[in-house]
Amino acid sequence: MLVAGNWKMNLGHADAVGLAADVVQVTADATDAVGVAVCPPAVWLDAVAERLRDSGVRLGAQNVHPEESGAFTGEVSPPMLRDLGVHYVIVGHSERRQLFGETSAFAAEKVRSAQAAGLVPILCVGETLDEREAGDAEATVLDQLAASLDGVEAGDLVVAYEPVWAIGTGRTASPEQAQAMHAAIRGALADRFTGGDGIEILYGGSVKPGNAAELFAQPDLDGALVGGASLDAESFAAIVAAA
Ligand code: PEP
């Protein structure tokens, strides 16, 4: 099981460092049994890395550019993240896809270059409400998954199923909806990669202390990518405890 917190574009320097220290403290008894990671804004990665040192909590980034270096103003490369001690990097989050026009092809480039630099991509896929209501949820997610893995060889990878309609809305997929999609994703990964059925598949979308346990009870849920609730150390710890 892996529980990763996506802090998004929140927290100033002092609050980010403080939250990192709190997360280390409140998850200390759990990190032998459950993977725990936090993904702060890029500008605080270095400071948060310092707070996570010698703890069981891993560092993740929220985004990366596929090129190693060059004229890409404002971007951060995989080797730069690696130099900071980053372990995971979120790729293809629906906010990147919807607000910044990022395509699955671009996500696939990021997955490939992140893996080449020794980072573990957390690849996000998910359908919109319209796609679900039209009965197209599974086809949409599996198409997105295949396109976002174009040219990707077996390697360290985590997949996060994040229905767009559940992100930051307070509306969570039911355990049955999540399980059905996770099983479909697992099948696709098993077809795509040798040993692909062992790839961790996280659920994301309004996970909270009150709904985490029933989600984690589903056989194909291997943890969660947590947005809003990861900004409160006690709530995050309760989700880790449920895992
Ligand atoms: C996310 O942004 O990845 C997410 C799951 O957010 P929230 O938990 O706030 O829905």
Image (spheres, grey):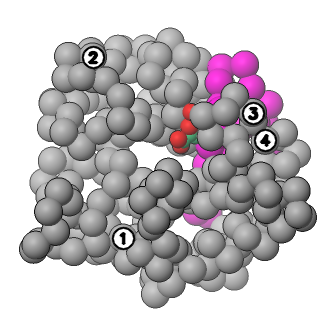
Marks 2 and 4 sit apart, C-alpha to C-alpha, by: 30 Å
Marks 3 and 4 sit apart, C-alpha to C-alpha, by: 7 Å
Q: What element carries label 3?
A: loop
Quadrant of residue 22 within the rendered picture: top left
Seen from the viewer's position, the closer of residues 101 and 49 is: 101
Marks 4 and 1 sit apart, C-alpha to C-alpha, by: 27 Å
Decide whether residue 207 is among the magenta residues: yes
Marks 3 and 2 sit apart, C-alpha to C-alpha, by: 27 Å
- Name the residue type under label 1: Lys
Mark 1 beta carbon near ligand 1 (under 8 Å)? no
The residue to which callout 1 is attached is 110
Marks 3 and 1 sit apart, C-alpha to C-alpha, by: 29 Å
Q: What stretch is highlighted in magenta?
A: 198-218
- Name the residue type under label 3: Arg
The reply to whether discs 3 and 2 touch (Cβ–Cβ < 8 Å) is no
The residue to which callout 3 is attached is 171
- The residue positioned 54% from the left and 24% from the top of the image is 229
Give the answer, above or below, for where 39 lies relative to 63.
above
- The residue positioned 85% from the left and 49% from the top of the image is 177
Kindly report which numbered mark, 3 or 1, lies closer to the viewer in this rendering.
3
Give residue 107's position: percent from left, percent from top. Answer: 44, 70
- Name the residue type under label 2: Asp
- Residue at the extreme left of the image, as rendered: 70
Mark 4 beta carbon near ligand 1 (under 8 Å)? no
Mark 2 beta carbon near ligand 1 (under 8 Å)? no
- Quarter containing the C terminus: top right
Question: In which quadrant of this rendering is ligand 1 seen?
Answer: top right
Give residue 98's position: percent from left, percent from top. Answer: 53, 57
- Circle 1 packing at 10 Å, graded few (<14), some (14-19), many (20+), is many
The residue to which callout 4 is attached is 173
